[in-house]
Image (cartoon, rainbow, N blue to C red):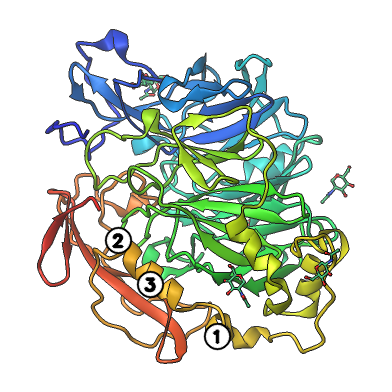
Amino acid sequence: MRSPSAVPWIALAAVQFASLAASQISDAPSVENFVRRFSGAVVVVGNYAYLDGGEVIQMEGGAIATARTVNSTLSLDLTKSWALKDAVFKSTPKDVSPSKGNAGAWANREGTAFYVWGGKSPYAINVTTPALYKFTVDGNGGGTWAIERPQNPNLFAGLLPTEAMALTTVNNTMYGMGGVASRWTTPSLGVDQVVPGMVKFNMDAREWTNITGTESPISTLVAGRAQYLPSFGPQGLIMVLGGHAPRADVPPTIGNSRLNDFVTLTFFDPVTLKTYTQTATGDLPIFPRAGFCTAGFQNKQGGHEIFVFGGENSLTKVRYQDAYVLSLPGFVWTKLPTPPFGGRAYFPCAAVGKRQVLTVGGLEFTTPGKDEAPMGLLVYDMTAMTWKDSYDATLGDYERPDAISAFYKNGSLDRVPWSSKEVQSLFVTGTGGGAGSGNGTSNPLPTENPTPDSASASAIAGGVVGTILALAVLSAVSWFILRRRRQKNKGIEFLPPEQPAIAEMAVPGNLYPNSQAKSGPTSVVVEADTFAYVEADGESRYAELPVVRMDRRSHETELDGGSAVKGEK
Ligand SMILES: *[C@@H]1O[C@H](CO)[C@@H](O)[C@H](O)[C@H]1NC(C)=O
Ligand SMILES: *[C@@H]1O[C@H](CO)[C@@H](O)[C@H](O)[C@H]1NC(C)=O
Ligand SMILES: *[C@@H]1O[C@H](CO)[C@@H](O)[C@H](O)[C@H]1NC(C)=O
Ligand SMILES: *[C@@H]1O[C@H](CO)[C@@H](O)[C@H](O)[C@H]1NC(C)=O
Ligand SMILES: *[C@@H]1O[C@H](CO)[C@@H](O)[C@H](O)[C@H]1NC(C)=O
Ligand SMILES: *[C@@H]1O[C@H](CO)[C@@H](O)[C@H](O)[C@H]1NC(C)=O
């Protein structure tokens, strides 16, 4: 049930008035008082999932209050099963480490600590001098915060901490890609700045490396995600997904960004940094998509599945209520059952137990009121393919579900349109070989020539996106109206021809705070399109799906054609 509150909570203010009910204000409000949580991080260390940073909205004095920064590190015990509504948070003060939103957070290999770097201070209040913070766990859900001093302080001093960086870890090294810096992330930074390239942090040596220019596997990346795939390639591979790639030479906007799709996937070798691409097939996620979350699972066949949930359309700010799995080595997307309670973005998820995903907060802002997910938590069972209202500590190992195994069992792995023999050999020979066949045999290399890279757009979708996708896409966004379709066969370097007027949007989670007027308009009309691959008239192409106009004052979304609907689907 949604709260009938009339509080204009969309205009979040970081500075609070003293509340009459001050005693009950909490970083982990009760299930009754909880309203929303967003922009935090989740890291699993040992037997606990730690929630760090972000903001929380709760009932205060009987009304929905504005957002407060979360001043504690919270933990959930993964050795016990619990209903989400009964989740018990253990709280440790963030005495040394300031609370940030959209920060980078990762665990060490030993399972003794996690680190937090970067992130934004809402409304640029108390932006701190950049530091790496380390939380050393005590084994009981608590721990101690300290600043982790770099081995190479001169290089560290020149690094710009960012928000919305994509990161993963390989052994004891963190690889952090892209992100954006602003006066919310860095003291007295004049202009918003997209941070190009990749940083590495070796946790054993406490050593930072900045990899830029042609050395770096990515140029720029905002609000994408990265996943380490240990079972492929000579030393594993790092997959980079989604987000957008602004030009680095001007203050970043969506308008000057390349919008990354989920068809041509990019990955690189963590040691040589050699970068590859490969087209994916199946139920391709709609893009643009930024601020989604991912979690990775290795299966018993030597393959790997990546869970992808939500995110927002960077143009319309509409948050996606959908989830997918990318199965490797088949490079095939499978759409999952629709997640409950609305679209989510700028929120974390993490693999918990042996085969579940825990997600925290991120409900869309166009739907006012309480997040109906208990305390903002959702759990997804990767094997049963179901969304659940509890975490189950007893569930066994991850097994690739039948809906995904079907692809491998009927020999589809032999028909993957590999971009090159080299890419094919990274995925279907060596230790990862046979990952897909379902009976453990390895798959010989087919003799025909691999599909050349340059054929991407038509090859991509030639045998790839069928009418099933088109139908799925259209039904998922059935509240949209298809305004027009136009050929947009521009391959992966796709830029939308029309630049929507989004710069002035004053919405929480806006990654470019300098480009928004602080006392800006409360009502902004956004007109923008969402893109997907569809197959029609025997050819595949980008199609513009919807035109959406959003009125931020009334929370109403107006469809092209004049019919106004509530901003909830
Ligand atoms: C966290 O501390 C800040 C600064 O004192 C305060 O404004 C905010 O309300 C606190 N958050 C909560 C949830 O109490
Ligand atoms: C900002 O820092 C000051 C001084 O440390 C502190 O008193 C205040 O509570 C902080 N404000 C917020 C919103 O964190
Ligand atoms: C790495 O170096 C490049 C080039 O000097 C710079 O633009 C970028 O900001 C640096 N990375 C970080 C995270 O500061
Ligand atoms: C990770 O560590 C293992 C064991 O120490 C080592 O064999 C492997 O080469 C390392 N991988 C990378 C990418 O450094
Ligand atoms: C194999 O199975 C996948 C997944 O069920 C399906 O999409 C594909 O069409 C099948 N291919 C053949 C040749 O049967
Ligand atoms: C394994 O699968 C391959 C290809 O589907 C098939 O040719 C082979 O006979 C199977 N082997 C066993 C032991 O089932």
Residue at the image position 19 percent from the left and 45 percent from the top = 519
Q: Quadrant of residue 436?
A: bottom right
Whichever of callouts 3 and 1 sits on the residue coming sooner in the sequence is 1
Q: Residues within 10 Å of mark 1 (few under 14, many from 20)?
A: some
Question: Of circles 2 and 1, which is in front?
Answer: 1
Q: CA distance from mark 2 to mark 1?
A: 29 Å
Q: Quadrant of residue 47?
A: top right
Percent across and percent down for residue 401 are: 62, 52
Is 191 rendered above or below residue 72? below
Q: Residues within 10 Å of mark 3 (few under 14, many from 20)?
A: few
Figure quadrant, ligand 2:
top left
* The furthest residue to the top: 23
Q: Amino acid at mark 2?
A: Thr
The quadrant the N terminus occupies is top left
Pointers 2 and 1 in contact (CB under 8 A)? no
Residue at the image position 85 percent from the left and 75 percent from the top = 444
